Image (spheres, grey):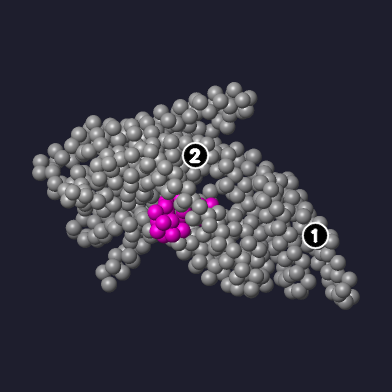
Amino acid sequence: MQLLYTILIMLVVVSGTRITAQFIPVPLPLLQILIGALLAVPALGLHVRLEPELFLLLFIPPLLFVDGWRMPKGQFRELRTPILLLAFALVFFTILGAGCFIHWLLPQVPLAACFALAAVLSPTDAVAVAAITHGRLPSTLSNMLQGEALMNDASGLVAFKFAVAATLTGVFSLTDASVQFVIVAAGGVLVGMALSYLFGRLRAWMIARGWEDPAPHVLMLLLLPFAAYVAAEHFGLSGILSAVAAGMMQSRLDLLPRQTTTRLLNRSVWMLLEFTFNGLVFLLLGLQLPDILTDALAIHHEDPWVFLLKACGWVVAIYIVLMILRFIWVYAYWRMSGAFRRWRGVPTRFAGQSRGALSLVLTFGGVRGAVTLAGVMSLPLLLNNGANFPERPLLILIAAGVILLSLLVASIALPRILPYVPQDNLGLREKQFNLHRAHLLEAAIRALEEVDEHGSDADAAVASVNVKAKLMAEYNELLERTQQNAKREREHTGEEAEGVEYRLRLLGLRTQRAELYRLRKEHQLDDDVLIEILRDLDIAEARLQKH
């Protein structure tokens, strides 16, 4: 019963902090961490001991799955070079540089354990950045941070496992670790893609037999990220990359026909799940802080205030080094990428923009979050020889401090830097949206023109002519509005009293959807535009089917 009360309290707090954040000028993640820490004080007595493996299994797969699902694949392809460099090369650059610095700063900690701490501090959290910037981050930079966060969770944790193994055994082989890393990463991706493909085939098989009830489809989709994670981990592969790959693959398989109601329910369920899990992650982080601090003080017998002062200094120093390494890497990439594009005669993606401002946004956007906390909490208690893991409580305290400091600095710095970064060209996006919307309306009009009702009786034929004229007039009016960049929203008035009107309206909507799928298949529009138009079509069809 106590567990049930704890869960209910946490859910109430998560929903309450979202409402409170509208009135308190504090980023939502920081507010949730602060309230979690306050709830964990002895006077209030809300105590939740974090199990790292359970935390990784329960929270990380669905959150990464939905991020991979929503990641625009066209943007991911265009930005694959900077994303992969940030997610893999920067991680190893950070491990090497920060690991050596931590060992210099804390000589009592073995070098392998310092590398383990640097590795677990490498993953970033794009969700926290989005909460801090409130959607003001340009889409290209946002997609870069999101793509990096999707990938570097896996690269950082895999490197962390190798460093911990080296600490436990005292043996490390760079060649063996490199080969094993490639196998673990590539294998995780393949497992996720395979399970997502099989799941898509299963759904298609169910639909072909008339099993279109959306509830089982949505429930199975909720289980997919957990299945991908567990299956990959069972074979010793990257469960995180498996969940990401399953999400990215599923975004293509979710375009199955006759799944309008399922897609609408999917969006609602995943929005609720994402909101709840994100809130619980930061709340749990806050709930761990008193225990983390207590454990660290228990093994350091000097004056608590002196120790806390030293610990704060270590946290600040390590965070500064992490940001310096990240800035050097990002700025060097901008310089080299710009020089290479000019040499090839290709216009740079960020022509005319300040490299310094772009680099600072990506630097401070490297916020650390839940994966870092879960990873560092999984440090073993003992070495293989039976001795205590060196300075384990201190390493956990430093990691928690870096998470908090990165959130605090980002919440202060990013709003002040963003005005110096050009925002998205909303006019261009609106133009692209209207262009594709007009193309779909024209396809629907052509389909209505080709409808032949010769097999119907006279009354039905007359009704068909009248309804066709009515629908074509509506589509032409919408087409005219779209071409004039007027409102995209439209009102459907009148009751669908006759079956012929329902059939022709449904034909128009499904023709637009089929044309939309064709354009996506031929890479003529990206996922963000597709999702927006598809949502309008799904809502229109759902509204039509209610009559």
Rendered position, 453 above or below 335: below
Rendered position, 279 above or below 457: above
The type of residue carrying mark 1 is Ala
The type of residue carrying mark 2 is Ile
Q: Secondary structure at mark 2?
A: helix
Q: Which residues are magenta?
A: 228-248
How far across and how far down the image is residue 360, in percent? 43, 32
Q: Which residue shows up at 37% across the image and 42% down it?
A: 177
Residue for badge 2: 83
Q: Which residue shows up at 25% across the image and 36% down it?
A: 111
Name the one closer to the observer, 507 or 169. Answer: 169
Rendered position, 108 above or below 465: above
Q: Nearer the viewer, mark 1 or mark 2?
A: 2
Residue for badge 1: 447
Name the one closer to the observer, 88 or 452. Answer: 88
Marks 1 and 2, Cα distance to the nearest angstrom?
Answer: 42 Å
Rendered position, 229 above or below 456: above
Inspect the magenta stretch and tell me whether residue 239 lies in it.
yes
How far across and how far down the image is residue 163, in percent? 31, 43
